[in-house]
Amino acid sequence: MDFRILKRKLEIGKRIDDFLDNVSESGLLFKLGVDSYLKGNVESFEKKLEDITHTENQGDSLRRSLEEQLYMQTLIPESRGDVLELLENMDTLLDRFKGAMWRFEIEYPTIPAEMHNDFKELVACVVEAVEAMVRSARAFFKDIAAVADHMHKVSYWEKQSDKISTRLQRNIFRQNELQLSHKLQLRDFVIHVDQIADQAEDVADKLSIYVIKRSL
Amino acid sequence: MFAFFISSGLFLGWSLGANDASNVFGTAVGSKMIQFRTAAVWCSIFVILGAVISGAGASHTLGKLGSVNAIAGAFIVAFAAAASVYLMTKARYPVSTSQAIVGAIIGWNLFTGSPTDYNSLTKIVTTWVVCPILSAVIAIAIYKVVVFFISKFKLGIFSQDILTRYGLLLVGAFGSYSLGANNIANVMGVFVPVSPFSDISFYGWFKLSSAQQLFFIGAVAIAIGVFTYSKRVMATVGEGIFKLSPVAAFVVVSAHSVVLFLFASQGLQNLLIQLGLPPIPLVPVSSSQAVVGAVVGIGLLKGGRGIRWRTLGGIASSWAVSPVIAAILSFISLFFLQNVFEQEVFRPTKYGLTPKAIERIETAKIFLHGLEHLFDKEFANAGRFDKVLSNQKMLTDQDRNFKMASTEIDKLEINAHRIDAIDNQLIAEKFILPLREIEGQVFNHHWQIEGALAERSVYWRQKENDKDYNAHLRRRIDYLCKVFRAEEN
């Protein structure tokens, strides 16, 4: 063993940070993208879509190289399985943001103006949930005692987005002027976005187990 | 011939290397924190250093328990110990070379009729009980400190990983050093009194005593055991028996190393004596038991639910079984070697109340009443004389030991021919001059030559508060006894 391992360790810590930046960034891009969409600013929306696709690609390749490095260099042998799973789950969140954006691009749903605020609020809550999850993951790598401080916020934002999603769905189906097909399409969109927060909560649940496993 | 007889000691050393190195580096290698090759190299280097530099302390206690005085006897003692370690390992009991060797020495004592020094035996057995308990306490303390350190400095997952790796390597090195220092006595201790080596001086820079040379050879055998066989054991220890996190592994190895060091360090003992504190006896302890103690300590700290008390009971009962097996094996093998292969398994030491011995004992104001009928009578071995002494009431251990030492007969003839044969490398001219003055004399006891020389030269007098000097003096006397021992003995 020599001091190269020290350098490797610094390197891998920085790359994990970069990867988590990507996840967090994709949330922000999603939020801006939906805003642009609701404003009807197609050009800005397409730009955000392009950006989020790029971020997702970057995240994917970072994750792959991180996984390789963890195994090739036998770093944190006792926790690398957990770390790997965590990285993969975080990557899924990133994918979901990108997926939702593409869905807007493909279907171009017409969202009634009176629902715009609720939609924006839902997106904001979902992004907050993922942000809290990113902070929890960062704490897992840097200061394990602080994980709990961030993790409870994930559940909070998930509950908030659940409430908004229920409200939105109720409103959608109470709109008499909309056709059933339109209602169903809008409901799918709401569920799709809300599921991102659910997923973030699932990741948080798993993270709490990893924390227990590492507890001294 | 010596090379053949020492082979059983080397076998014991090899099995110690194969088994006990895994206590030091097993968890680190098993959990993939340290590569096997790195661990093996560090372990070997530090075992050798520990054995050569600090090996003398614990081997002295073993020597007191029973001084195996013939090479074939030493061969059997080490062989019986190694064989019982092997048998117990096969039966899947965690064993300790320390216990096996103590049992084997007692077997030799029983066979040859030498008395067992109960004082040393009590010291050793008490230590075996204390060692795992102490290890548990130390492990709890270190664990608390480590947890505090990690939470206080908010160590990240990767920083903790890297620190644990270096920590494991460092305590592993310390553990190997302590293992060498403490357990080399098990491997080579019985050969020390019969060693054919003499001290080597490297251009006056430093000296290697004959015991240290033996320890070096034994430590190399341990190192070979580490390289050739410990990999498998390490993998089992790391993954199978104790599923410890790397940080917990660090704590366990630290506690183990501290305990082994405590029971091997002469420096620490001197320090405690200087401070007026009770000294720690220097006794070979079992590294497996130290590890088990530390693991149980951590288990208790976490509420004690994870501890398998049944397994622990099995381990504890093996403590009682292994010395008994070794003693029986040693006794039977000695019988065969002596009667079937006609080898001298012990040099009979006679005892007798010679006029000189009586004079010495009376001068020391020790009571001889009731032994008058034994004056001028010789006893074939220590056991018989010891039996006679034990009929005397009110005899303290100290007085008894003094009587035994005073009455041991070893005929020494100081003649010019033998004085010339003394190796000047070992004994300097200033020490030889007074020998010339007593040329032609014949002594019956070791202490007589000691006294005669001390009378004639300051160099042969013991110095107060200089343990090292006195130990050297002791070795010189032992060497002289070997040189001047009369043929008829």
Image (tube, coloured by chain):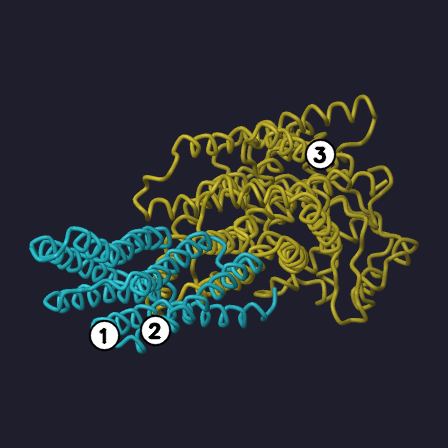
Chain colours: A cyan, B yellow
Q: Amino acid at mark 1?
A: Gly
* Quadrant of the rendered image containing residue B405: top right
Instruction: Output the chain of dot 1.
Output: A
Q: Amino acid at mark 2?
A: Glu
Marks 2 and 1 share the same chain? yes
Q: Nearer the viewer, mark 3 or mark 2?
A: 2
Q: Residues within 10 Å of mark 3 (few under 14, many from 20)?
A: many
Instruction: Output the chain of dot 2.
Output: A
Q: CA distance from mark 3 to mark 2?
A: 83 Å
Q: Earlier in the sequence, mark 2 or mark 1?
A: 1
As helix, strand or loop, the secondary structure at mark 2 comes to helix
Residue found at the far right of this picture: B417
* Quadrant of the rendered image containing residue A28: bottom left
Marks 3 and 2 share the same chain? no
Disc 3 target residue: B79
As helix, strand or loop, the secondary structure at mark 3 comes to helix
Disc 1 target residue: A40
In the image, residue B6 sits, relative to residue B155, either above or below, namely above
* Quadrant of the rendered image containing residue B95: top right
Q: CA distance from mark 1 to mark 3?
A: 91 Å
Frontmost residue, A216 versus A74 = A74
Q: CA distance from mark 2 to mark 1?
A: 11 Å
Q: Nearer the viewer, mark 1 or mark 3?
A: 1
Q: Quadrant of the N terminus of chain B?
A: top right
Using the image, tell me which numbered label, if any, was put on residue A70: none
Residue at image coords 79%, 43%: B411
Disc 2 target residue: A46
Percent across and percent down for residue B121 are 54, 39
Q: Residues within 10 Å of mark 2 (few under 14, many from 20)?
A: some
One can see residue B118 in this view: yes
Is A19 left, or right, of A31 in this rendering? right
Percent across and percent down for residue A150 are 25, 64
